[in-house]
Amino acid sequence: MIKYILTIIAIIGIFSCQNTSHPVSDEDNGVVLPLGFPPLPINLDNPLTKVSIELGRKLFYDTILSNGGISCASCHKQRFAFSDGGNHVSFGFQGRSTTRNALSIVNVAYYENYNWDGKFHGSNAIEEIVKTVVHLPFEFNCDSNTVNERLRKHPEYPKLIKNAYGESAEPNLKYAAKAIANFVRSIISGNSRYDKFVKGDTAALNESEKRGLRLFFSDRTKCSECHSGHLFTDNKFHSTGITTHYFDRGRFLVTDENEDRGKFRTPTLRNIALTAPYMHNGEILTLEEIMQHYNNGGKIFINKDKRMKPLGLSQEEIKDLINFLHALTDEDLIKNPKYSKPL
């Protein structure tokens, strides 16, 4: 019981040291941050404002940036916590397959590294991702000139872009990418039953979920060493021995360092019950399979994280952990009209 109480105190400490005692709303951007979430990072190149967020929301659901009727929302669906739930990998122009599972874009305003391999990083990474996706033949299969012409001739976007970015702002891909990036930054999730529990509602979790919480934050499983903090990710790169041979070499493709072969960025566990299938290639279909993988210590691989060892968890303990992961689902996120397609 003492160890359990200390665990809860530690978790609550994560929240209490990062913010005020109430949710925070920035009067300029209207983004409400849950208790315990730190202020959003400031991007001086693209300030977060209500008008840019609303413009970005409209563009996020629009197919104007692509050929073939594809939008950002085609692969990042609100009901799946803005992942492409159900698909191993995503499909773009004319049903062409991408190479990786679409990550949830929730809470990415706080990230330093993006995508599974961290190819994109820094304060303007989301803007660069949008522009890159537009040009990829297996995703949007479009080009800047076409996009610029469509935006210029659109009955609403020239005025909306000027409203968001000033009279000198031209209707082009640059500003469309900025607006979409700001909408994505505004997508915040932090109101799961787990969050309610650490804020003091001890009835928010049942007994199985509480046991799973204790296991998750224990030295025995070490889950929280990589799935850490309010984001439930360290935003770093690890190999967990998903396979003995990685056809997708992961972080190595960015660094060209052998020690990075088969390493991928730690995904957030927030809303994990909504984002199946899992891992960089969508190879693992269920949370039960994931837990069995970790319980077995993963497969043999040269760069496998040294913490990947057999855990010896019983089936009941595995079930408790899975139940805890379900408690990380934020029902408000998937229903919030601020994130939905504009009417």
Image: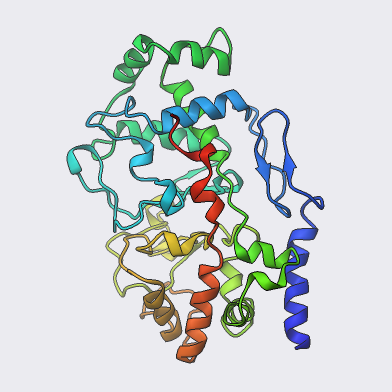
Q: Is residue 4 above or below residue 333?
A: below
Judged from this view, the residue extending furthest toward the top is: 167
Residue 327, how many percent across, how many down? Answer: 56, 68
Which one is nearer the viewer's eye here, 305 or 101?
101
Which one is nearer the viewer's eye here, 59 or 134?
59
**Residue 216 falls in image quadrant:** bottom right
Which one is nearer the viewer's eye here, 166 or 322?
322
Judged from this view, the residue extending furthest toward the left is: 94
Q: Is residue 111 above or below residue 5?
A: above
- Asked whether, in this view, residue 339 is left or right of residue 68, the answer is right
- Asked whether, in this view, residue 160 is left or right of residue 26, the answer is left
- Asked whether, in this view, residue 69 is left or right of residue 78, the answer is left
Residue 287, how many percent across, how many down? Answer: 41, 72
Q: Is residue 137 above or below residue 165?
A: below
- Asked whether, in this view, residue 69 is left or right of residue 210, the answer is left
Residue 321, how many percent across, how many down? Answer: 52, 78
Residue 88, how many percent across, how many down? Answer: 29, 59
Does any portion of residue 125 appear in the rendered image?
no
Does any portion of residue 52 appear in the rendered image?
yes
Q: How many marks?
A: 0
Write the residue at 62% across / 54% down: 190
**Residue 87 falls in image quadrant:** bottom left
Q: Quadrant of the C terminus?
A: top left
Q: Quadrant of the N terminus?
A: bottom right
Q: Is residue 6 above or below residue 192?
A: below
